[in-house]
Image: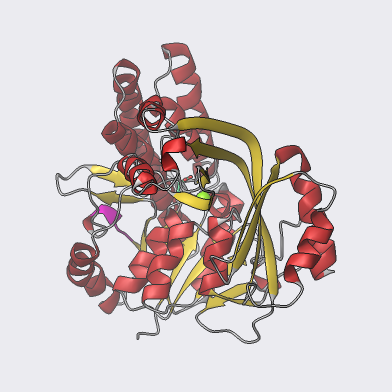
């Protein structure tokens, strides 16, 4: 292991000049941070997604103007922005022509090319912000390192190629003592085209780079000072968690805590790299360390909430004493690249909830008509929406005495649509009406954490 850290700054940490300066000061203060991975300035990716989905000329002009203003507002505060402004203008011109093309005919490849411009611009500007603080950094196009497959919108990294590229491109820079500033979220397919790792994918990029560099840790700088027992906006008594395990954090990320992208932990777990989450606006407040085996391991760690859940209930009398029904269902879901999180079955039906987190960069709907048609050929399909998943995360929940009683007692007055208990030692999930979700979270938090 090296003594190197990879630091990632999210959209709010590079949203404007003062946020960028705060982030730059964090980089400067930590000599171990040799690689900086950036998101696009907050709001930019959303605007670019809008353009990629195709807009009429008037709306297009407004959206591009919004992007320009976000970036110009930062440039206006630089002491000398002449050269960088020309570069940003080139990117904005590019955005304009790509948006025009997207209005005629959009495609996943074009979408990725277009939305990658957000990270390109924020990283170029960040180098200038560092320079004005007397810190020289080298800008690197991360596509020369992160190799992926061709799955535009949610590409999977090719670990071997990425390792090879890191050894040849990134490590030499670091060994020369350079501080490298690069982009999260994007990669390059074998064809040479730009890909993205899915919305929020910059965390994942940072962890991947930490892995191929054998870094000692990944520092995720965001707008909250760590991971909390639940969203403090829902339950004000929520407390910061100082240390938690990869397993717990993975459950939290998967079940809706927005702090870490679910895939971030894959490389971290694989290579046992500690992940730190802290606030770039208030680094002195401390944060959360996510590690392999922190002590103690409390029974109840946190409550995560995921809104907008879709419950798919599939029933068929043919399922009675039959074999292969579930296999067929899962084959169809796999073909449509749908990831299922919770599932319950009975003799003639199966109910499952679908994963929307880390969805494709374009925000395309998961439940396509093709998918529903294929499933309907096999069984009755019922789609329920307006639901939220409340996940209780902890340790050895399956063997802890009285857990079910406390939870069900607390939920007594709510209509619980589905419960998933026992498959994981780390979580218990309940599916409730979205209109009840905040109250359910508050009630459980009060019962188990306060
Ligand atoms: N800019 C991308 C997004 O907004 C990636 C990221 O922020 O992690 O999804
Ligand atoms: Mg983000």
* 396 within the magenta span: no
The magenta span reads 139-143
Residue 433: x percent and y percent? 71, 40
Residue 108: x percent and y percent? 30, 33
| Outermost left residue | 191
> Residue at 27% across / 44% down in the picture?
151
Q: Kindly tell me whether residue 136 is visible in this rendering.
A: no
* 140 within the magenta span: yes
From the viewer's perspective, tell me whether residue 178 is left or right of residue 262. left
| Outermost front residue | 321
Question: Is the residue 391 above or below the residue 323 in the image?
Answer: below
Residue 12: x percent and y percent? 58, 50
Which quadrant of the view contains residue 4? Answer: bottom left
Point out the image quarter for the C terminus. Answer: bottom right
From the viewer's perspective, tell me whether residue 407 is left or right of residue 249. right
> Residue at 44% across / 19% down in the picture?
60
Give the camera-side residue of 307 and 63: 307
> Residue at 41% across / 38% down in the picture?
318
Residue 344: x percent and y percent? 55, 51
Give the camera-side residue of 15 and 136: 15
Question: Is the residue 379 above or below the residue 23 in the image?
Answer: above
Give the camera-side residue of 132 and 230: 230
Question: Is the residue 283 above or below the residue 197 in the image?
Answer: below
Which quadrant of the view contains residue 228? Answer: bottom right
């Amino acid at each position: 292991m090296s003594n190197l850290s990879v630091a990632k700054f999210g959209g709010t940490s590079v949203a404007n000049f003062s946020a960028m300066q705060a982030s730059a000061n964090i980089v400067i203060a930590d000599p171990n941070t040799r690689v900086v991975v950036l998101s696009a300035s907050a709001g930019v990716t959303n605007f670019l997604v809008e353009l990629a989905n195709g807009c009429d000329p008037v709306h297009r002009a407004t959206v591009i103007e919004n992007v320009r203003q976000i970036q110009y507002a930062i440039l206006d505060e630089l002491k000398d922005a002449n050269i960088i402004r020309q570069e940003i203008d080139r990117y904005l011109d590019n955005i304009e022509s790509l948006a025009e093309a997207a209005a005629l005919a959009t495609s996943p490849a074009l979408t990725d090319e277009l939305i990658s411009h957000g990270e390109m611009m924020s990283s170029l500007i960040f180098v200038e912000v560092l320079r004005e603080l007397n810190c020289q950094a080298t800008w690197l196009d991360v596509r020369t390192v992160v190799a992926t497959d061709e799955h535009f919108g949610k590409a999977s990294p090719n670990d071997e190629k990425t390792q090879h590229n890191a050894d040849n491109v990134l490590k030499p820079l670091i060994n020369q003592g350079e501080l490298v500033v690069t982009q999260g979220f994007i990669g390059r397919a074998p064809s040479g085209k730009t890909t993205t790792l899915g919305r929020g994918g910059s965390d994942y990029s940072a962890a991947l780079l930490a892995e191929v560099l054998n870094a000692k840790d990944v520092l995720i700088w965001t707008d909250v000072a760590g991971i909390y027992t639940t969203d403090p906006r829902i339950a004000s008594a929520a407390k910061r968690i100082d240390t938690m395990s990869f397993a717990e954090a993975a459950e939290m990320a998967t079940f809706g805590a927005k702090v870490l992208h679910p895939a971030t932990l894959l490389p971290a777990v694989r290579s046992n790299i500690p992940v730190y989450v802290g606030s770039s606006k208030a680094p002195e407040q401390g944060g959360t360390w996510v590690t392999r085996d922190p002590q103690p391991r409390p029974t109840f760690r946190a409550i995560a909430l995921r809104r907008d859940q879709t419950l798919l209930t599939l029933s068929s009398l043919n399922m009675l004493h039959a074999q292969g029904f579930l296999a067929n269902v899962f084959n169809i879901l796999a073909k449509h690249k749908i990831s299922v999180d919770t599932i319950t079955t009975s003799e003639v039906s199966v109910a499952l909830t679908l994963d929307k987190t880390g969805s494709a960069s374009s925000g395309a709907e998961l439940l396509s008509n093709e998918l529903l048609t294929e499933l309907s050929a096999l069984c009755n399909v019922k789609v329920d929406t307006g639901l939220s998943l409340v996940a209780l995360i902890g340790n050895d929940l399956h063997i802890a005495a009285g857990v079910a009683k406390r939870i069900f007692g607390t939920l007594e007055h709510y209509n619980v649509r589905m419960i998933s208990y026992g498959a994981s030692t780390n979580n218990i999930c309940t599916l409730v009406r979205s209109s009840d979700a905040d109250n359910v979270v508050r009630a459980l938090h009060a019962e188990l954490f306060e």
